[in-house]
Image: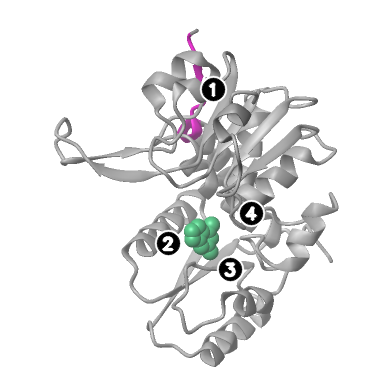
Amino acid sequence: MKPKIIDGKATANTIKAEITAEVLKMIETGVKTPHLAAILVGNDPASETYVSSKSKSCHEVGFISSLYKENENISEKELLKLIDFMNNDEDIDGFIVQLPLPKHINTQKVMDAISPLKDIDGFHPVNLGRMLMNNPSYLPATPYGIMLLLERYGIETEGKNCVVLGRSNIVGTPMSVLLSRNANPGNCTVTLCHSKTKNIKEICAQADILVVAIGKPEFVTADMVKNGAVVIDVGIHRVDSSTTKSGFKLIGDVKYDEVAPKCSFITPVPGGVGPMTIAALLLNTLKAAKKEFSF
Ligand code: GUN
């Protein structure tokens, strides 16, 4: 089977162009420019990369972006004070606190302190609860980006057997909720697999739609995939390579070369889910700027 490659980069670019057009309209009508702020604590290189690519994307669509870079040793109290400032600053439409946070800070306490109306990551319990109940809310960016890919590629989800690998708060768990909600895309029969799951290979092989967010390079092999399945790969790992100039390459949680020929649709790594996460975050920021929610 020749799979259709789900081009996340192209879809994200289309969404960014749509957002840019909206921003221009907002500016023309005297509405203020959307503003996304980010708090980055410490100097974790991966977090620095994520935050700078979010900021770059903001500028591409005409948003204002600001970065609050804090020392690794910031106290929890100081961080909560900064969040309180951002919650009340009318110029900031939405903000994120880049994770992970240093160990001396209680991440849940920090997430709880963010105003749900400015929580464009969709990590606050109010947003997560509203998502669970199929009420309008900010959706976590990676699952939201995947739902947009399913929608824009016209992939039928209703009544499908869907298997999600990984139960993180950021990806696997919200993904399982979104796919099982009574919505379109949605209405799947979902199985959520995790580290204690037995017969994971057999369960994966039953999936019409397989979402892999397990964080293990090339974990999913061809024998785990049904013919004609849709495979969404959330993983991204940098590994050494003798075949590239840079000396490294990016791979996913799926062994792409052997799995792709069995699929109807598959996301590549890079260029699949990654760019859509940022596009989804931009869409959440636009919703925040338009004050779409009033809970
Ligand atoms: N760290 C890894 N992914 C994310 C994300 O989506 N949002 C935030 N705030 N931190 C992260």
**Residue at the front extreme?**
198
Name the element at disc 2: helix
Q: Cα distance, mark 3 to mark 4? A: 13 Å
Sequence order check, earlier mark of 4 and 1: 4
Q: What amino acid type should be assigned to the residue bearing mark 2? A: Val
Q: Cα distance, mark 4 to mark 1? A: 27 Å
For discs 1 and 2, the disc positioned in front in the rendered view? 1
For discs 4 and 1, the disc positioned in front in the rendered view? 1
For discs 1 and 3, the disc positioned in front in the rendered view? 1
What residue does disc 4 label? 140
Mark 3 beta carbon near ligand 1 (under 8 Å): no
- Toward the viewer: 227 or 76? 227
What residue does disc 1 label? 225
Mark 4 beta carbon near ligand 1 (under 8 Å): yes
* Residue in the picture at 33% in, 72% down: 43
Sequence order check, earlier mark of 1 and 2: 2
**Vertical relation: 266 (above or below) 276:** above
Q: Cα distance, mark 4 to mark 2? A: 16 Å
* Residue in the picture at 68% in, 50% down: 174
Sequence order check, earlier mark of 1 and 3: 3
Count residues near mark 2 (Cα–Cα under 10 Å), then give few for <14, some for 14-19, many for 20+. Answer: many
Q: Quadrant of residue 41?
A: bottom left
Q: Which residues are magenta?
A: 2-10
Count residues near mark 1 (Cα–Cα under 10 Å), then give few for <14, some for 14-19, many for 20+. Answer: many
Q: Cα distance, mark 1 to mark 2? A: 34 Å
What residue does disc 2 label? 51
- Toward the viewer: 199 or 21? 199
In the picture provided, is 249 more to the left or to the right than 284?
A: left
Q: How is the image coloured?
A: one colour
Sequence order check, earlier mark of 4 and 2: 2
